Image (cartoon, helix red, strand yellow):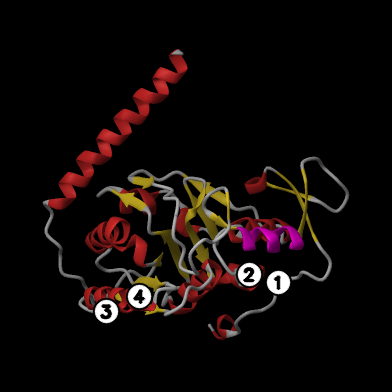
Amino acid sequence: MIAKGLRITKKYIDDLKWLMIDILWRFKSQPKTQEVSNQQFSIGVVTYVNRYEIHFLPLIKRLLAIFPDTQLIIAINGYYDSEVQKKYIADITNLLSSYDNVTFFSYDKGQSLSKLWNQIVIHSKKKKTFIFNDDIKISSCFRNSLEQSGIVEEGCGLVNSSWSHFLINRDIIKLNGWFDERFSGVGYEDQDYEIRLVNNDFLIKDFKVRGLKNIVFKTKDFSYGSNIDTDYEKYSSVNGKVFFKKWLISPTEKGGFKYVRIIQGYAKQVEGMETPNFYKEIEKR
């Protein structure tokens, strides 16, 4: 009972802290963006219509304030309702077009998260790119904590143990390949990529960064259509089918299997399920 009470108290304090942060952001004026002078990294964010008001608008305001000198790449996913999508594209395009440091691209129909991540890397003007989910909150100390954490020196690294916010270097794409676009929805692409990193003898590191809250919003209406089958209430079931067709998973050590942190178990690739080379652009940079 004591432990449960402590958890409730900790959550209450954290919620109260972020409520105060949200209130303070409302009174901050939007600064003018600058020419892109940050030579260390770009930042990419994937979003779509049902997250526009509640998640994306607060996040882009904060990113523009904290990273006015940094290329922000916005991947605007499609949506199955063409009329809703048309209005959304007009609204978000009008917003983003007014900022000099924002690059954006959009789709009419829903695309896989793997494809959107790949396209962010392709559109990035820097060798290193942070990719963030849109359902996060950041405070004013976030940039300093991020840059002081040591992650910028990495080839690929996780912020606060999650693929909801990570850094990727083009050299890692050359080593590990692109995110697998055979995962046509959302989910499992991060597990797949980390397994492949392990198979390529790359140990992904985790970096603790202050000023970041991962909301983990559970989507009820996906880009791809209504009544999409899901796993764990947030992943596309179609992605799960591809994952278990590609990988053999074991809870215990076996010959030919390697231990992978993200799945808390051992994995071995199924013969014939090697990841295709989806793009050749990376070889030119």
- Residue 32 circle label: none
Q: Which mark is residue 85?
A: 4
Left or right? Give the position of 248 relative to 236: right
Q: Give the Cα distance between marks 2 and 1.
A: 6 Å
SS for tag 3?
helix
- Pointers 4 and 3 in contact (CB under 8 A)? no
Disc on the earlier residue, 2 or 1: 2
How far across and down, in percent of the image, does residue 105 sit? Answer: 39, 79
Q: Which class describes the residues within 10 Å of circle 4: few (<14), some (14-19), or many (20+)?
A: many
Image spot of residue 268 (x, y percent) = 79, 56
Answer yes or no: do the residues labelled 2 and 1 have beta carbons within 8 Å? yes
Upstream in the sequence, badge 1 or badge 4?
4
Q: Residue at x 48, y 73 (%)?
A: 110
Q: Which residues are magenta?
A: 237-246
Disc 2 target residue:
180
What amino acid is found at the position of numbered circle 3 in the picture? Ala
Element on which disc 4 rests = helix
> Any mark on residue 275, and which?
1
